[in-house]
Amino acid sequence: MACIIRGGNPLARIFLSYAREDAGAAKQLAECIGRADHEVWWDRHIQGGSRFSSEIDRALKGAEVVVVIWTAASIESAWVQDEAAEGRDTGRLVPVSLGGSRPPLGFRQFHTVDLGPWNGEGEPKDLGDLLGAIATTAGSSALKTAEGAEAEQKHHGISICVLPFVNMSGDPEQEYFSDGITEDIITDLSKVSALLVIARNTAFTFKGKVMDVKDVARALDVTHVLEGSVRKAGDRVRITAQLIDSKTGGHVWADRYDRDLTDIFAIQDEISKAIVAALRVKLLPEEKKAIETRGTSSVEAYNLYLMARQQWTESGMGDVRRQEMIVRICKQAISFDPNYAEAWALMALAQSQLRFWHGMDVDPQAAAERALAINPNLAEAHCVKAHLLEEEGRPAEATEEIETAIRLGPESWEVNREAARLIFRQGRIADSIPYFEKAAALIESDWHNSSMLISCYRGTGDHDQLVRAARMTVERADKAIAKDPSNSAILAAGSAALAIVGEEQRGKEWIDRALLLDPDNLNMRYNLACGLATDQNDPDRAIEVLEPYFKTTLSATHIRHAEVDPDFDLLRRDPRFKKMLTDAKARLGITV
C-alpha cells in the first residue's frame, strides 16, 4: 500500500509504501517526514472516485524518493514489493526496517535504515538517519533542476494503455506474433520516462473483449489508448495502429504499415517514435537508443523465439512434449542468429525441465552460459544457474544467483516463477507468495503459478486466499484444457482446485483422465497427489500415485520440495510416505 503530508515548501516528493497492517506506524512516520518539509504521499489520501491503481502509479512515478517500510507483514505483500521494485530500479529506494525485519530477496543489497523496536509512537530514535538518506537520494538542487522538465512532464499525466493487437491472419496459431508485437511496443514505450505506461498484464486483461476505447480509458484512468491489428501472410506483414485521445475518442495519430516481414523491427521503432512525437513528449538520447536496441537483427530468429516463448508460457513443467518442442524451436532460432541471448536462455530453461523433471540427458548449463556470455545481464539465464546450483547442494550460491535475477528482471515472468519455487523449497512458504502472485499476474493464462498459490495459502492458513487461488486456477485451467484436452499437467493442477470450489466429481474425472493419458508424467503424479492428500481426502490413492514419483525422480530439489510442501502435511505420519521419502533421499545421496 502506499497521503499527502507536506511542510511549507516541499524539499522532495516522497512516496511511502507500507502494508495495511502497519498503517498506524506509516501515518506517524509520514508526519515526521512531513515536518522536515518533504511532501509525503500515501494511499490514505486518494480522492473519492479516483482510479485506485492508476492514482498510485502516478504518485509513484512522480516521487523523487520511495520510502518502503519493511515489516513481517509488508515482506509478504506483493503490492509493497512491486512499489519497492519501482524505487529500486529507478535509484529512488530508501528502505526502512521495523522490528528487525529483514528485507526480502532482491532488496538486501541496499542499506536499510533500522528503526529498531519503534512502534509508531512519537519520533523514531534514528529519524535523522532516515532524513539523511532521503536527502541523499533526492539529490542536489542542481540535479533536480536539470531533471525538472522531465519530472514536470510526468506530473502532467500523459499515460497510455497499449491494447493487445488483434491477430487478423486468419490463423489462431499466429496469435504469438501479434502478442509479441504488442509486448515489444509496451516495452519500448516503458523506456520513455515522460510516459506512464500501463503494465502488460493489465493491458492483456482486455484481450478478446469488445469494448469502447473510451470505456477502457475510463477504467484505467489513462489519457490515451493505442490499439491495432497484425496480419502476417508469408513474407509480408500489415500492421495498423491508432492512438486515441480518451477524452474525445478522436484519433491523435494513425498509420498502416505494409512491409516485408524483414522490416518488422523498423515498424516497431517507427510506431513507438510516432507515438512519442504525437504526444509531444521528450525522448532522451539514451531512451531513443534503448528503443532501437533488440536482442536480434534476424526476423527469422525473432519469429521463432516468439513462437517458442508462447509454448513456454502456456506449458506446465510436466509437459514433456512442449519442452522438447521449445528446445527444437530455439535451436532453429539460434541457427539464424547464434548470438541471440534470449533464445539461448529460453532453451536452457526448457532443458532444465527436461533434465530434472523427465530425467533426460541434456545439459542446460551450456546454453545458460552461452546466453550470459552474450548478455551477462539476462535475468532468465541467471535463473537457470540458480536452479543448477541448488541441484548441486549449494543453496547460498543459488540464493545469491536468484537475487541477481530478481534485480535484473523484476518484471520477468520466468524470474518471479523461479524465485518463488526456490524460496518455497527452502521452506519459506510465506516469503514465496509475492513471487507466485506476481508471476500469476504477469501472464493471465498462467494456471501453474495460481495452483502453487493454493499450496502456499494452505501452508499459511489463509482460507479466503486459498479459495481465491483455486477459483483462479479453475478458470485458467478450463481455458487451457479447451485448447489442449490431452494435457495431463493441466488436468492434475485443475483437479485439486475443482475439489476446493465444490466440484469434486469433475475433479475426480480429471484425475482418472490424467492418469490414463500420461501415466509416466512425474509432475502430473505429484500434483494429483497434492489434491488427493488434501481436499479430495484420499490418502491411500495419494500414496499410490506418488510411489513412481519417489522411485524415479532424479532431482534433489524435487525431494526438498516434497519435504516442505504443506499439501503433504497429513501424509507425513504415514509409514509408507516416510519410507518412500527416505528411500528416495538415499538413492539420490541426500544427507540433510
Image (spheres, grey):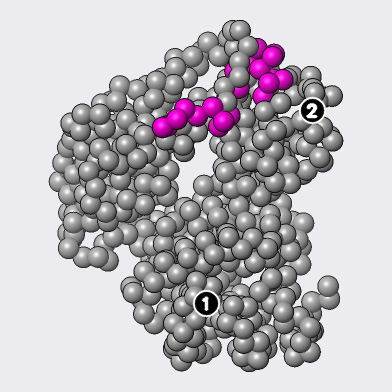
Q: Going 51% across and 67% down the picture, which residue do you hit?
A: 470
Q: Name the residue under label 1.
A: 499
Q: Is residue 483 magenta?
A: no
Q: Going 33% across and 74% down the picture, which residue do you hit?
A: 482
Image coordinates of residue 414 in percent, x first then y, are 53, 57
Q: How far apart are marks 2 and 1 (CA)?
A: 47 Å
- The image quadrant where one finds the C terminus is bottom right
Q: How crowded is mark 1: few (under 14 residues within 10 Å), some or many (20 or more)?
A: many
- Label 2 close to label 1 by CB (< 8 Å): no
Which of 177/229 is in front? Answer: 229
Q: Say left or right for 503 vs 96.
A: left
Earlier sequence position, callout 2 versus callout 1? 2
* Amino acid type assigned to the residue bearing label 1 in the image: Ala
Q: Residue furthest top?
A: 8
Q: Does the magenta stretch include residue 39?
A: yes
Q: Say left or right for 110 vs 160.
A: right
In the image, residue 406 above or below residue 131: below
Which of 379/474 is in front? Answer: 474
Which element type, helix, strand or loop, lies under badge 1?
helix
Query: Disc number at residue 245?
Result: none
Q: How crowded is mark 2: few (under 14 residues within 10 Å), some or many (20 or more)?
A: few
Q: Going 46% across and 78% down the picture, which residue do you hit?
A: 503
* Amino acid type assigned to the residue bearing label 2 in the image: Glu
- The image quadrant where one finds the N terminus is top right
Image coordinates of residue 332 in percent, x first then y, are 38, 66
In the image, residue 278 above or below residue 204: above
